Image (cartoon, rainbow, N blue to C red):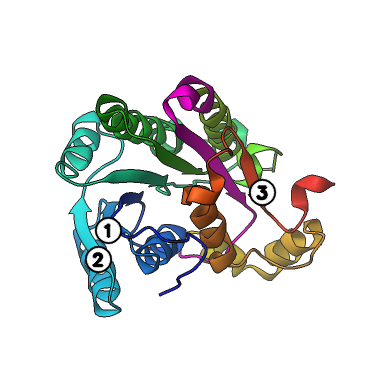
């Protein structure tokens, strides 16, 4: 478990979606390491239970809650589970990607990417902020975006469109909720080795092309992504809102 980047979150409730694996899991571990009570959300109950068990074994506080972020009733159920606690932050790390040439791209894949990456992010942000607004509490919302929310890439029309939408949604919600002391930001990494990206990065030609485009010559480290999320969740980021923080080795600086 990684502690430190999020400061002291002792006694605060944090929800992390997509927490069963990859970036979502590491974010959950990081925030639990900072003392937060973390609600782990994903569709796979088995994966969540494994993560909750690992966090608890390391001395953290985590509970698994299987839910589909694309369903409005599930978003409501997640935030209802926080009743009686001290809701502080939501990390929207649930996401998916299905690649393919645009002219033959299956609309079912388009809908799947948009549902999880955009609809799910909006539903969870709206439900969580509703809890804070009704209680008159400050809080944090951090959305996982991507460098593809700033640039384009062949074969990723749906994913790029979805992450551009996440960036726009982040800015709009930040402006809407700023007076209520709810900050809304996004973290936008380059390629990170996770279960989602592993099949793509296993192709030597693709990996070489990706590294060629990153000025640092390195993939993003999953701990660096989690640390960026931890900062935006922390008290130190109280005046930071509506921002998209790139963790991309300089890809979008070209």
Counting residues from the start of the chain, the first of labels 1 and 3 encountered is: 1
Counting residues from the start of the chain, the first of labels 2 and 3 encountered is 2
Alpha carbon of mark 2 to alpha carbon of mark 1: how far?
5 Å
- Residue 204 numbered tag: none
Query: Is 178 included in the stretch rendered in magenta?
Result: yes
Seen from this angle, which residue lies furthest right? Answer: 254
Q: Nearer the viewer, residue 207 or 121?
A: 121
Give the crowd class for mark 2: few <14, some 14-19, many >=20 residues within 10 Å: many
Q: Which residue is mark 1?
A: 37
Tell whether 242 sits left or right of 84: right
Q: Position of residue 87 (x, y in %)?
A: 28, 43
Q: Give the label, 2 or 3, closer to the camera.
A: 2
Q: Nearer the viewer, mark 1 or mark 3?
A: 1
**2 and 1 marks in contact (CB < 8 Å):** yes
Counting from the top left corner in percent of width and height, residue 195 is at: 45, 65
Q: Is residue 65 visible?
A: yes
Give the residue at x 43% y 49%.
93
User: Is the residue marked by circle 3 packed among few (<14), some (14-19), or many (20+) residues within 10 Å?
Assistant: many
Quadrant for the N terminus, please: bottom left
Reply yes or no: does residue 247 show up in magenta: no
In the rendered structure, the answer to whether residue 253 lies left or right of residue 128 reads: right
Q: Mark 2 and mark 3 in contact? Answer it, CB < 8 Å.
A: no
Q: Is residue 176 above or below residue 36?
A: above
* Residue extent of the magenta highlight: 174-195
Q: Which residue is mark 3?
A: 246
Q: Position of residue 32 (x, y in %)?
A: 35, 64
In front of the other: 84 or 72: 84
Mark identifier at residue 61: 2
User: In the image as oriented, which residue stretches furthest toward the top?
Assistant: 176
């Amino acid at each position: 478990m990684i502690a430190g980047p999020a400061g002291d979150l002792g006694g605060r409730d944090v929800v992390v979606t997509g927490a069963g694996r990859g970036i979502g899991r590491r974010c959950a571990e990081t925030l639990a390491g900072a003392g937060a009570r973390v609600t782990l959300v994903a569709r796979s109950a088995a994966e969540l239970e494994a993560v909750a068990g690992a966090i608890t074994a390391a001395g953290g506080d985590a509970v698994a809650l299987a839910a589909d972020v694309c369903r409005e009733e599930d978003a409501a159920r997640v935030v209802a589970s926080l009743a009686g606690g001290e809701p502080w932050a939501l990390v929207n790390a649930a996401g998916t990607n299905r690649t393919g040439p645009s002219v033959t791209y299956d609309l079912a894949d388009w809908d799947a990417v948009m549902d999880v990456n955009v609809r799910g992010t909006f539903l969870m942000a709206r439900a969580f902020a509703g809890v804070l607004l009704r209680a008159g509490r400050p809080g944090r919302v951090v959305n996982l975006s991507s460098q593809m929310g700033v640039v384009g890439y062949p074969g990723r029309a749906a994913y790029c469109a979805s992450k551009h939408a996440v960036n726009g949604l982040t800015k709009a919600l930040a402006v809407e909720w700023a007076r209520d002391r709810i900050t809304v930001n996004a973290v936008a990494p380059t390629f990170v080795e996770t279960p989602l990206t592993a099949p793509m990065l296993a192709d030597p030609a693709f990996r070489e092309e990706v590294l060629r485009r990153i000025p640092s010559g390195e993939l993003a480290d999953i701990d660096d992504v989690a640390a960026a999320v931890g900062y935006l969740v922390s008290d130190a980021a109280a005046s930071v809102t509506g921002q998209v923080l790139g963790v991309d080795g300089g890809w979008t600086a070209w």
